[in-house]
Amino acid sequence: MDSLIKLNNVDFSYGEDKNFILNNLNLEIERGSFTVVLGRNGSGKSTLAKLMNGLCKPSNDDGVVIVDGIDTKNEKTEIEIRRRVGMVFQNPDNQLVATIVEEDVAFGPENLGLTPQETRKRVDDALKAVGMYRYRKSTPHHLSGGQKQRVAIAGIIAMRPECLILDEPTAMLDPEGRDDVLDIITKFNREDGMTIVLITHFMEEAQFADRVILMSDGEIIKDGKPEEIFSDIKTLEDIGLDVPQTTGLLYKLKEKGIDITTDAISVEETAAKISAALHLEEN
């Protein structure tokens, strides 16, 4: 396995607080993968995201976070970490820094010391990739929430990171905005091979992932493929997470005696399973 990010024996607490938010965390993120991290508020998933791009450092001496071979504790390599791992936050207003869209997207590349010509190319390419090129001369605060989040993503993409970490990027968006953002990040992963780590509380968003990690009280309690995770309804309920509606429907049918498996998340997969099960019942 070619790991881009490795966390070994990581504890973390804010300031002098000895109540650790993360406890002895061990995790590897494979290059080119799409990982979704799920957990209730306070489970430690946002702190995990910040550790993976160097915004936070392990609190314990023997805790280590390695990004593409670089130890995040080394302050001299922070720019190199940012080159490799970009981060998009929940509220795009906290990430937009300029009064014109294209200037905002140019902020990152300019701070990497790129030439004006290379910066221009990256800004145009990033805005086209997220479908916001025609808004390049617009004022960000005139945009919708979904459009702002696209611009925030473009600003990170323009720096061409190997990994994109998104911390609840769709939490403040309407369903259409959520779908747009998910389409964009799925495309980056599938077509460009970009490593994606998506922190979310929307269970349905996990259907696009290769891997789902469940967190509770600062620990990873389950790690596997989406179908495997969501078929374990008891674990999800024990840590206070809702089961995806599709999985819940299949589970109810199984309880009613229908011969059907519960390892589907998407509407299409669920419909196919129900259709096949009902066909068998008729025969």
Image: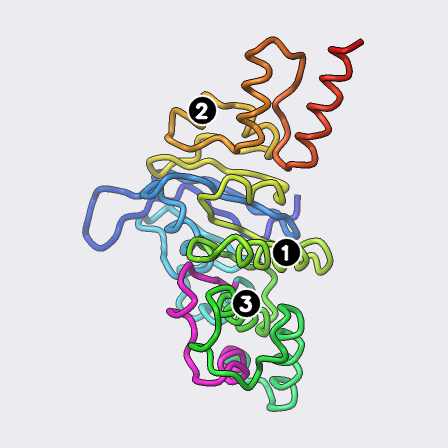
Q: Earlier in the sequence, mark 1 or mark 2?
A: 1
Q: Earlier in the sequence, mark 3 or mark 2?
A: 3
Q: In the displayed structure, would residue 47 be above or below residue 254?
A: below
Residue 249 in percent (x, y) is at: 56, 25
Name the residue at 64% across, 30% down: 264
Residue 128 in percent (x, y) is at: 66, 74
Name the residue at 63% across, 60% down: 184
Please, what is the three-letter code of the amino acid marked with disc 1?
Asp
Q: Which residue is mark 1?
A: 183
Name the residue at 42% across, 33% down: 241
What kind of element bears circle 3? helix
- Badge 3, how many Cα within 10 Å: few under 14, some, many 20+? many
Q: Which residues are magenta?
A: 86-108
Based on the picture, tell me whether residue 93 belongs to the magenta stretch. yes
Q: Which residue is mark 2?
A: 235
Residue 109 in percent (x, y) is at: 55, 80
Q: In the displayed structure, would residue 171 be above or below residue 243?
A: below
Based on the picture, tell me whether residue 221 belongs to the magenta stretch. no
- Badge 2, how many Cα within 10 Å: few under 14, some, many 20+? some
What kind of element bears circle 2? helix
Name the residue at 77% across, 13% down: 280
What kind of element bears circle 1? helix
Q: Which residue is mark 3?
A: 150
